[in-house]
Amino acid sequence: MDWSHYPIPAMRLEARFGDRVVPAFCERPLSLWAMIAEAAARNPDGEALVCDNRRMDWREVAQQSAQIAAGLRKIGVRRGDRIALLLGNRIEFVLALFGAAHLGAVTVLLSTRQQKPEIAYVLNDCGATLLIHEAALSDRVPDARDVPELTHRVAVDETSASLFADLVRDEPLPAPADVGEQDTAMILYTSGTTGRPKGAMLAHCNIIHSAMIYEACMQLTRADRSIAAVPLAHVTGVVANIMSMARCAGTLIIVAEFKAADYLKVAARERVTQTVMVPAMYNLCLLQADFDHYDLSAWRIGGYGGAPMPIATIEKLAVKVPGLKLINAYGSTETTSPSTIMPPELTSAHIDSVGLPCPGAEIIVVDAAGRELPRGEIGEIWIRSGSVIKGYWNNPNATAESFTGGFWHSGDLGSIDKNDFVRVFDRQKDMINRGGLKIYSAEVESVLAGHPGVLESAIIAKPCPVLGERVHAVIVTRAGDVSEAMLRAWCAERLSDYKVPETMTLTSEPLPRNANGKVLKRQLREGWAAGQA
C-alpha cells in the first residue's frame, strides 16, 4: 500500500543536519514566517483564529505578529534567543509563536501543568531570556535568583493594559529575520520518564514538512476549520492544529480546555471540519445525552492517536456523523508529530494498525542489537524522515543515544507487515513479562475497550515473586453494573489465558494523563504499589 492515489507534492532526496539524507518536498516555504506570510497573502480576509468572542483574519494575524516581533526586538530579544511560553489555549499563544518566528527567535513551550521547579529547570536549561506567561500563573514563575538569564517577564491577561498588549503597540518590523530552514524554531521538552526532561529541537524544515504532510494526507484547504481541543503547547496542538492551518490558510478554533458538552456546542456553532483528539475524547462526546441535537454535518476529518479507537466508537460515529472520516496517526515530539497516518478509507479494515508510514518516512523494526527484523516480527520502532528532529538541546549524549544514521529510536515496540501497515504494541518499559511470556498492554486494553461498560483502561505490571510480573487492569467504567468477573470473562473469551488481567481496579475517575493526553502508567504503578504497602 502507498500514498500514490493522494495528491502528495513532489519530493526529492536532500541532505539535512550534516550527515542525513531524507526525502523533502521540492516546493516548500523556507521558514515558519514564510509559511504564515503565504497564508496571509492567499487568504487575507479568511478567518484565521477564533477564540470565545474574538475573531481574527489572516491579514490581522500577520500584522499583529509582526508588531509583536517589533515589540520583542525593542526590549532586546534577538534572532536565536529563546522565548518561553507558559500559556494556555488562547489567541495570544499563537500570536506570540508567530511573532517569534518573524523575529527568528526560538520558542520554548511550557505546559501550564508544570510546577515552579520544573519551569525553572527548563528556563535554565534552554537559557531563555524572556518568559510570556498567564497572569494567573504568576506564582509559578521562578524567582529571579533561580533563573539568572531570564531578563524579561511578560504577563498575559484579559485587559488591554497587560504587558503583552504593550508588545502590539509598535510598528511592524519591515522585514522578517533571515533564518535557515535547518535552524531551530522551537524547543519542546519531552516528559522525562527517566532523569531530566530533554529539549527536542524542532527545526523550521521539520515543522513545515509535518504541516505539509497533514495538508496532503488529510486533503486540507482554506475551507477547513480545525478545533484545538488538546493543549497548544504540545506537539499535537502546535503542529497538527496551528501549523497545519497555517499551511492551508484555514481557521483555528481555540478552546481553553476539552469539556465534551462545551466542545459539541463550539463544534456545531463554528462548523468545525477537522479534529485531532485521543479516542477517549470521541467517547466522551458520544456519551452526551444531547449529542444528536447538534449539527455536526461539517465534521469530515477525525484524527486520533495515543490509543486504539474502540470498534464500538467507530460504529457509533459512522451512524451519527456519516460524513466523518476517522484517521489514526502515530508520532511523537521527536518526529514533529506524524510518522504514520491511516488513509481513512482503510481505517475499518485495519483497526489494529496506526497506519502507513507518512510520505517520505522510512520505518523499520529492530532487535536489541539494532538489526532490522523481518516483516511481522516485534521489535523497537526506528523512524527516519524529514520530520525527525536534529537532536536534543545542549545534550549531545542523549542525541547520540537516541539517533543512528538519522533514525530516531522511538522506544516503542511494534511491527510492520508486508503491506507497510505499522502496529504499535507498547513502550518498551510498559511490556509485561509474565514468566517469560510477553504481554503487550495495548492488546488487552483494546479488548477491554470493546466492552460496553468500559470507558477506558490501562494495563500495568504487578510485581510477582514467582513469575516476575502479572497483569493488573485499571478500568474506568460507565455507570451501571460492571463487575470484575464480567470483565474477566469478556477478556477470557478474546485473549490467551495468560493475558487476562488477574487483578483489577474499577473506578469512575478518569485515568491520569499528561498534558498531551497520554496515560501516565508510571503514576498508576506507583499508586498501586502505595496501596499495597
Image (spheres, rainbow, N blue to C red):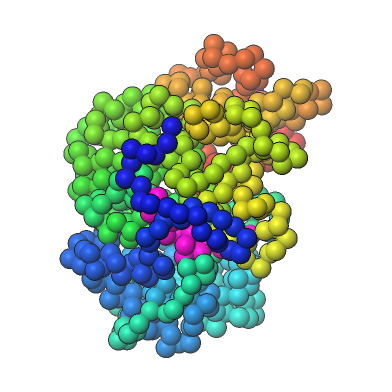
Q: Residue 115's x, y, as percent?
A: 57, 62
Indicate whether 324 appears above or below 229.
above
For the C terminus, the quadrant is top right
Tell me if I can see residue 512 in this picture: no
Residue 146 is covered by the magenta coloring:
no
Q: Please give the name of the residue rendered at 68% of the width and 64% of the height, measured from the top-left corner.
A: 395
**Image check: 116 left or right of 165?**
right
Q: Please give the name of the residue rendered at 37% of the width and 39% of the height, measured from the top-left corner.
A: 4
Front one among 104 and 359: 359
Among the 4 quarters of the image, the one containing residue 295: top left
Q: Residue 215's x, y, as percent?
A: 34, 50
Q: Please give the name of the residue rendered at 41% of the width and 56% of the height, measured from the top-left corner.
A: 25
Front one among 182 and 353: 182
Q: Residue 137's x, y, as percent?
A: 48, 67
Region of the chain picked out in magenta, as a range: 198-213
**Image check: 311 left or right of 486?**
left
Q: Please give the name of the residue rendered at 52% of the width and 38% of the height, measured from the top-left corner.
A: 511
Total label count? 0
Indicate whether 255 appears above or below 411.
below
Tell me if I can see residue 351 in this picture: yes
For the N terminus, the quadrant is top left
For the stretch drawn in magenta, the main secondary structure is: helix
Front one among 482 and 200: 200
Residue lying farthest to the front in this orientation? 12
